[in-house]
Image (tube, rainbow, N blue to C red):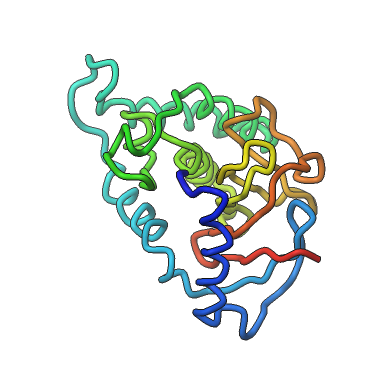
Amino acid sequence: MRLNKQSLPILALLLISLNVWAVPGTSSDIFGYQQIVRSNLEIFPQWLSVLERHIEELTPAGKCQQTRFNQCHLKQWLRFLASIKNLPEHEQIRRVNQYANEKEYVLDIENYGMDDYWATPKQFLTRNGDCEDFAIIKMLSLKRLGIDTDRMRVVVVQDTNLRIAHAVMALDVKRDMLILDNQVEEVISHKDIFHYVPVYSVSENKWWMHLPK
């Protein structure tokens, strides 16, 4: 995620100019900010592309001997998910977070030659990735385990400590939002995080804009 601290206000202004706040949906909160739900995901082509490419890439193929560009990483991921399928949900969440966080952080510019690229799980497993790639594989892992996609989203935030943009995965559990973050080993409640300012978040069917209360 290579948006800088100047980019996020510009993004917010762009969303306003698209009239996305004209008819607000249900409101709740995350990181202490209210959220307005919308359904026009077309303004997030990178996200839609990830979802489409992921479906196309779900068939494992290729040789398994290579360390980095190993096409069998996808098969190993599916085997891992099958191994935790019958565990309690809280343990599935913990293990998915741990599994993804063991991967190496690599900037998009180094991986793909561009400042911002949203990778599919298959690409992440074979090439590693940056913060939104960690969030994406966690969300799609939990989806494959049977967790309702309406409970999950990728959240783009501003990290006020590091003064950079960042992305995490959020999961609605018993009226709490649990955060799966590649910068944090444990899964924790959004209520215990004070240095993230949410900008927008996306799920498979909708997206949210976040505003101060």
Q: Position of residue 141 (x, y in %)?
A: 49, 40
- Which of the 4 quarters of the picture holds residue 68? top left
Q: In which quarter of the image is the C terminus?
A: bottom right
Q: Quadrant of residue 149?
A: bottom right
Task: Specify the farthest residue to the front.
Answer: 6
Identify the residue at horizontal 48%, vertical 75% (top origin). Answer: 40
Residue visible at 62% across and 33% down in the picture: 92
Q: Could you tell me which residue is drawn at 57 percent across and 42 percent down?
A: 164
Residue 73 % position (x, y):
33, 26
Q: Residue 157: x and y, percent?
A: 61, 50
Along the line of sight, which residue is nearer the eye, 155 or 91?
155
Q: Residue furthest left?
A: 62
Q: Which of 179 and 213 is in front in this view?
A: 213
Say which of 68 and 200 sits in front. Answer: 200
Looking at the rendered structure, the number of numbered marks drawn on it comes to 0
Q: In which quarter of the image is residue 24?
A: bottom right
Residue at 28 percent of width and 39 percent of height: 112
Residue 48 coordinates in the image, percent (x, y): 38, 60
Relative to 107, is 10 on the left or the right? right
